[in-house]
Image (cartoon, rainbow, N blue to C red):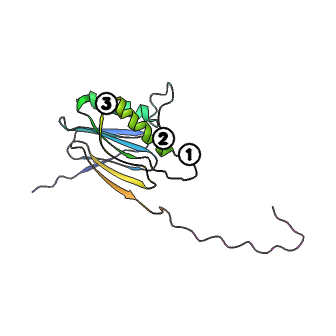
C-alpha cells in the first residue's frame, strides 16, 4: 500500500484556493469568520474561501474580506476550471462569537452565507457554525471530505493579577 504525501494549502483571511490535485488539502483556522468549502465531486475539484464580514462594499468587488465577493470569486473560479454549477455542494464552518460584549459578527456571517447559498441554489450538505470556539478546518477538495478540530480553552495563559499599588504619602495625589 502506497501513501501519498499531502500538500497543505493554507487559506488565510480574505483569500480563497481551488484545487483538483489529489494530494491537496486546503486548511484554515476560523473564529467569527466563515469558510465555505465547495466541491464538484464528479469533476474532482473543490475550493475554500475565508471571509471576515458579510455582504459587500459597493464597487469594491475585489475585496475578499466580504462574503459576497469571496463567494462569487470562489464559484466563478470553480466554473472556469470545469466544475458544473448544478453539481456544486457546500459545507460551511465558523461564525463563532469570539468576544461576548461586541456585536456578534459571527451570527451575521452565518446568516449571510446561508442566504447566499440558498439564493444560488447550492446545496449545503453540512455545517458547523456558531458557538464560542475557534475551528481548524482541513478540506480535501477532490472528494469533498472535511475534518474539523474545535479549538477550545484559552489560547494564551492567564496572567496573575498585578500587585496592588504601593501606598502613597499623605498629601500627594498621582494621576
- Residue 131 lies, with reference to residue 41, above or below; the image says below
Q: Closest to the observer: 6 or 153? A: 153
Which residue has dot 2 on it?
108
Spatial separation of the CA atoms under disc 2 and disc 1: 9 Å
Residue 23 sits inside the magenta stretch:
no
Which mark, residue 118? none
In the image shown, does 104 or 9 lie closer to the viewer? Answer: 104
**Marks 2/3: CA–CA distance:** 20 Å
Q: Residue furthest left?
A: 1
Q: Which quadrant holds the N terminus?
A: bottom left
What is the spatial separation of the Cα atoms under label 1 and label 3, in whole angstroms?
29 Å
Local secondary structure at mark 3: loop
Q: At numbered mark 2, what does the secondary structure look like: helix, strand or loop?
A: helix
Q: Write down the region rendered in magenta.
A: 159-175
The percent coordinates of residue 104 (x first, y second) are 52, 46
Identify the secondary structure beneath mark 1: loop
Of pointers 2 and 3, the one earlier in the residue sequence: 2
Determine whether 87 is above or below 160 in the image: above
Location of residue 175 (image quadrant): bottom right
Residue 19 found in image quarter: top left
Answer few, some or many: residues within 10 Å of disc 1's Cα (few below 14, many 20 plus, some between 14 and 19).
few
Q: Is residue 83 visible?
A: no
Q: Earlier in the sequence, mark 1 or mark 3?
A: 1
* Crowd tier of the residue under label 3, counting other residues whose Cα lies within 10 Å: few below 14, some 14–19, many 20 or above: few
Residue occupying the point 17% across, 52% down: 4
The answer to whether the residue labelled 2 contacts the one labelled 1, judged by CB atoms less than 8 Å apart, is yes
Where residue 76 appears, as percent x and y from the top left, is 32, 28
Which numbered dot is residue 103?
1
- Name, please, the residue furthest toward the right: 171
Amino acid at each position: 500500500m502506497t501513501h501519498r504525501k499531502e500538500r497543505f494549502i493554507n487559506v488565510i483571511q480574505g483569500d480563497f484556493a481551488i484545487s483538483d490535485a489529489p494530494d491537496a488539502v486546503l486548511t484554515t483556522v476560523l473564529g467569527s469568520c466563515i469558510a465555505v468549502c465547495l466541491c464538484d465531486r464528479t469533476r474532482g475539484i473543490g475550493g475554500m474561501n475565508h471571509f471576515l464580514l458579510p455582504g459587500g462594499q459597493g464597487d469594491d468587488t475585489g475585496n475578499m474580506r466580504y462574503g459576497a465577493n469571496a463567494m462569487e470569486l470562489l464559484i466563478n473560479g470553480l466554473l472556469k476550471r470545469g466544475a458544473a454549477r448544478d453539481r456544486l455542494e457546500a459545507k460551511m464552518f465558523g461564525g463563532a462569537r469570539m468576544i461576548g460584549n461586541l456585536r456578534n459578527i459571527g451570527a451575521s456571517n452565518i446568516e449571510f452565507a446561508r442566504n447566499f447559498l440558498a439564493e444560488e441554489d447550492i446545496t449545503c450538505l453540512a455545517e458547523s457554525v456558531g458557538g464560542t470556539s475557534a475551528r481548524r478546518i482541513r478540506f480535501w477538495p477532490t472528494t469533498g471530505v472535511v475534518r474539523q478540530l474545535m479549538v477550545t480553552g484559552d489560547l494564551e495563559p492567564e496572567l496573575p493579577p498585578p500587585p496592588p499599588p504601593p501606598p502613597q504619602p499623605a498629601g500627594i495625589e498621582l494621576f
